[in-house]
Amino acid sequence: MRKKLFKKLIPSLLAVILLTGCSSMSSGVKVGDQEFTATSIQKSVDEILAARKTVDTSQMNLVNGPELLRDQAQFFVVRVLMDQIAKDMSVDVSLADIAARRSDVISRLASPAELPAALVSANLPASNLDPYLKVLIISERLQDNFVKSGATESELPLYIDKLVVDTANKLGVTVNPKYGKWNPKNASIEASDATDGAVVPLP
């Protein structure tokens, strides 16, 4: 009887293990109840790499490999954290605000045709330009609010950093080890080791 029951359970257990394995492989980062898959993060990386082929990168300081992957994963985390901070601090950023900032950014270039190169230089995929500008606007408005409340300019980075760290700890952040190790003290994804795994210690 026990053998028959055991044989019946094996397929079910295998199915659970396989599904769990697939889930962990497809997971990227999770912030609170918002989860971004590894595929969506890789899509940003692929977009950056494709864009690099269309411009002259010889004079650019670009990140590659694990660092590029980690940077993109970090941005997905930052987007959620800043959206939550904006909500908590009653900071509203409209689509019109983002469009106006985008126009301002483009106007500062010698010509609109230089935007792709500027994005490549910033290691930013074109699809993340608007989300990046939103994060930037939120940060600026938070700083303005802090100044109005009496904070000095030297204190602003500390205020923003504390908000980000506190919000990350409140929501909870889970990171796939393939991107690195989550450091709750500074709300950032760090390399698992100093060499990003490039150097393997001798046994």
Image: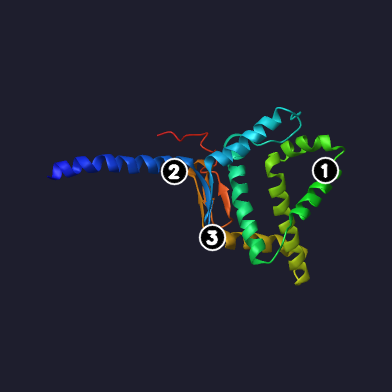
> At numbered mark 3, what does the secondary structure look like: helix, strand or loop?
helix
Q: Would residue 4 be found to the left or right of residue 190 on screen?
A: left
Q: Pointer 3: what residue?
A: 171
Indicate left or right for 20 with 66 as reference: left
Residue 187: x and y in percent read 58, 55
Tag of residue 142: none
Labels 1 and 2 touching (C-beta < 8 A): no
Q: Are marks 3 and 2 in contact (CB under 8 Å)?
A: no
Image location of residue 56, percent across then percent down: 76, 28
Using the numbered discs, state the Cα–Cα distance from disc 1 to disc 3 in whole angstroms: 35 Å
Q: Indicate whether 158 appears above or below 62.
A: below
Residue linked to disc 2 = 24
Q: Which residue is mark 1?
A: 106
Q: Of the residues shown, which amino acid type is indicated by label 1? A: Ile
Question: Looking at the picture, which amino acid does disc 2 mark?
Answer: Ser
Q: Quadrant where the C terminus lies?
A: top left
Q: Residue at x 81, y 51 (%)?
A: 100
Residue 123 makes an appearance in the image: no
Secondary structure type for disc 1: helix
Q: Residues within 10 Å of mark 3 (few under 14, many from 20)?
A: some
How many residues crowd mark 2 within 10 Å: few (<14), some (14–19), many (20+)? some
Q: Nearer the viewer, residue 123 or 12?
A: 12
